[in-house]
Image (cartoon, rainbow, N blue to C red):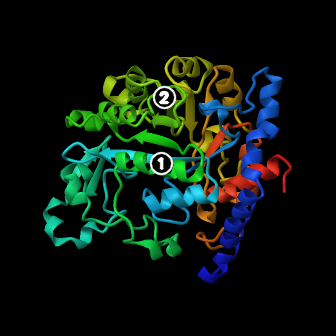
């Protein structure tokens, strides 16, 4: 499929979500009675969004713009975040890494080689180096070797240009935002749109940065307090792949915490450093989930922990994770759904072009039917339409 042909489904999803918002479908999601709510009612659990604030007031399923609207704009830019809101996303995600002078900036990784034009800056050529981060050797340029002022001379660009060629149109348009800039932006956008702007903020490699004297949690907590997002009902989730980071944040602020969970055989890096033998497979047992619920309000599992794939890459039978997590009072925000064939389960791929859109709606239907509370999506408009489909709305 050619690049021109790809624009047809992309345009359909964008226009579909925009129309749904105009017609009130996004509002209707908050009062809907989809599969997730019905399953919750059977358990005697009231998950109908109520008035006021707090994460239980969010629509179910909640659509989280993954790194903004990264299916359409270079990730972790104000342009990507704003577009996610324009498409109707309920929550927008940020990943945090520090600068050398202690500012928190929004990048998926501290290695900025692939997401900025740093390689085009001869003044920073000598900063290219090799580091071991969470046991993995990486060569490139790293945020902790730059001051904020230096990072602000760089421009953001598309991370996977071979897959998302259209996104390269926006290369160089935006700088790297700090989380403080995002907090201010969220306040301004909230006033302009007449509603709270929810954020989903992740601490990246917290043990690694703490070893460098650049602890993330205290810096983040200070900013959350400054901007009034430190309370239990504040419009923000705090997430990390390291449980100890969420435990540390829980002692500093009352905002809801979410423990991210990768492959079943993997171990959180803080467990590796502490000699804790538990794997993610241990954490998704009833006992492990009970432990997580003692300090967090949710989990963010990889989608494979919700519905595993077989050897051919096709979806199998859902696990009991949704039921077991809900039994502990935990919400589930799995990651990450993308529209391109390369990222979809095998049975939902269409054609042979890995960069073309497949049957994203079919894939989303399978995941949403499990009763998950939300989903991270690179294409939030597609996820919103899938949620409306599930609830029987046009």
**Residue 91 located left or right of residue 104:** right
**Residue 176 located left or right of residue 350:** left
Q: Decide if residue 359 is in sight here.
A: no
SS for dot 2: loop
Residue 45 lies, in percent from the top left, at 75, 22
- In the image, residue 188 sits, relative to residue 50, either above or below, namely below
Q: Nearer the viewer, residue 10 or 130?
A: 10
Residue 268 lies, in percent from the top left, at 42, 32
Q: Residue placed at 62% from the left, 34% from the top?
A: 332
- In the image, residue 213 sits, relative to residue 27, either above or below, namely above
**Residue 27 located left or right of residue 233:** right
Corner quadrant of residue 251 = top left
| Residue labelled with disc 2 | 255
Corner quadrant of residue 347 = bottom right
- In the image, residue 29 sits, relative to residue 43, either above or below, namely below
Q: Residue placed at 64% from the left, 20% from the top?
A: 328
Q: Nearer the viewer, residue 271 or 95?
A: 95
| Residue labelled with disc 1 | 186
Q: Residue placed at 31% from the left, 62% from the top?
A: 113
Q: Residue placed at 71% from the left, 45% from the top?
A: 367
Q: Nearer the viewer, residue 246 or 311?
A: 246
Residue 123 lies, in percent from the top left, at 14, 68
């Amino acid at each position: 499929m050619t690049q021109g042909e790809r624009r047809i489904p992309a345009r359909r999803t964008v226009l579909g979500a925009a129309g749904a918002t105009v017609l009130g479908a996004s509002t209707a999601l908050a009062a809907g009675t989809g599969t997730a709510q019905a399953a919750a009612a059977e358990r005697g659990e009231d998950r109908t969004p109520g008035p006021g604030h707090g994460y239980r007031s969010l629509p179910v399923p909640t659509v989280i713009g993954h790194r903004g609207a990264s299916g359409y704009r270079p990730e972790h830019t104000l342009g990507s975040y704003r577009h996610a809101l324009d498409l109707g996303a309920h929550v927008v995600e940020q990943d945090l890494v520090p600068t050398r002078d202690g500012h928190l900036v929004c990048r998926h990784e501290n290695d900025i080689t692939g997401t900025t034009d740093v390689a085009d800056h001869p003044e920073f050529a000598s900063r290219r180096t090799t580091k071991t981060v969470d046991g993995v050797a990486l060569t490139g340029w790293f945020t902790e070797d730059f001051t904020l002022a230096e990072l602000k001379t760089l421009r953001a660009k598309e991370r996977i240009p071979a897959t998302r060629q259209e996104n390269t149109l926006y290369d160089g348009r935006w700088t790297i935002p700090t989380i403080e800039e995002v907090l201010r932006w969220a306040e301004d956008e909230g006033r302009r749109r007449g509603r709270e702007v929810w954020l989903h903020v992740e601490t990246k490699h917290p043990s690694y940065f703490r070893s460098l004297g650049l602890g993330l949690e205290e810096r983040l907590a200070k900013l959350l307090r400054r901007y009034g997002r430190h309370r239990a009902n504040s419009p923000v989730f705090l997430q990390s792949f390291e449980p100890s980071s969420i435990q540390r944040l829980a002692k500093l602020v009352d905002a809801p915490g979410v423990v991210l969970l990768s492959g079943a055989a993997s171990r959180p890096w803080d467990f590796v450093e502490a000699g804790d033998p538990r794997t993610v497979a241990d954490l998704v047992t009833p006992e492990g989930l009970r432990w997580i619920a003692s300090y967090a309000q949710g989990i963010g599992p990889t989608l494979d922990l919700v519905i595993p794939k077989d050897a051919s890459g096709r979806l199998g039978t859902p696990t009991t994770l949704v039921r077991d997590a809900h039994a502990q009072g935990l919400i589930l925000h799995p990651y990450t759904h993308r529209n391109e064939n390369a990222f979809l389960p095998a049975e939902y791929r269409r054609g042979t072009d890995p960069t073309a859109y497949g049957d994203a709606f079919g894939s989303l239907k399978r995941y949403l039917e499990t009763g998950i509370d939300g989903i991270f999506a690179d294409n939030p408009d597609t996820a919103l339409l899938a949620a409306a489909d599930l609830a029987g709305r046009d």
